[in-house]
Image: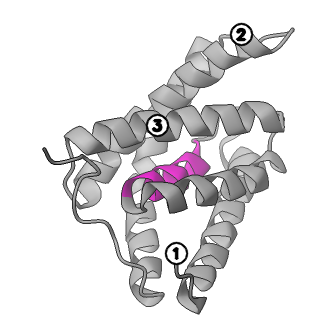
Amino acid sequence: MKLNLNFFFNFLILVLVLALCCGFQTSFWFQLFGNVPAPLLWINVIIYIALYRKPHVGIWVIYALGFVATAFSAIPLKMMFVTLLLLFGVVYAVKSRVFWSGSGYYTIMSVFGAVIFHLVYFICSVVLERNSAPVQVLDRLTQIILTPSFAFPMYWLLAKVDRWTHCEELQESGGVEL
């Protein structure tokens, strides 16, 4: 696997975008909207990587971004890694069956990813932790509704970063042809 300077530059920009999204989500959002649960902006970055990177590169990038995201949350590292691996697997399985490039598909997958993240996180929390995560139906539903509202600007920004750093977007599904 040949890694070049553009890949590292792209990776550093993704880390910066993720850190800015996490910072906005964890502090600035509550200054503007009070107790309204913040959207999972960092999930949009993870979904973009899962959709537009090859699997062996995407998993490593998602794990590195997950490590950065744990600094902004109360999620333990083991829960973050397990949840992100399962989220990547589910998104990749859907992408291998149905895929088209563009912001519309990305927005649909953002909704799907937010739902899957909450389901997988809750199930993993029940299975792996002594004190499982609370259900909080209204908070989780609000996050699921708000997360895709930021998907279009996020897609535009991340696609622009990929074009600027000459990272190739995957234009085909990840499926295997028979």
Label 2 secondary element: helix
Q: How many marks?
A: 3
- Please state, as top left, top right, bottom left or bottom right, where the C terminus lies in the image: top left
Check residue 94 in the rendering and tell me which mark sits there, or answer none. Answer: none
Provide the major secondary structure of the magenta segment.
helix
Check residue 89 in the rendering and tell me which mark sits there, or answer none. Answer: 3
Residue wearing tag 2: 127
Q: Residue at x 16, y 48 (%)?
A: 177
x%, y% of residue 169? 34, 71
Residue wearing tag 1: 1
Q: Residue furthest front?
A: 178
Q: Residue at x 57, y 82 (%)?
A: 3
The answer to whether residue 86 is above or below residue 92 is: above
Task: Please say whether residue 111 is visible from this viewpoint.
Answer: no
**Of pointers 3 and 2, the one earlier in the residue sequence:** 3
Q: Is residue 98 left or right of residue 21?
A: left
x%, y% of residue 128? 77, 15
Distance from the alpha carbon under mark 3 to that under mark 2: 19 Å
Where does the magenta region start and end? 40-51
The answer to whether residue 17 is above or below residue 49 is: below
> Foreground: 150 or 86?
86
x%, y% of residue 129? 82, 14
C-beta proximity under 8 Å, tags 3 and 2: no
Label 3 secondary element: helix
Amino acid type of disc 1?
Met
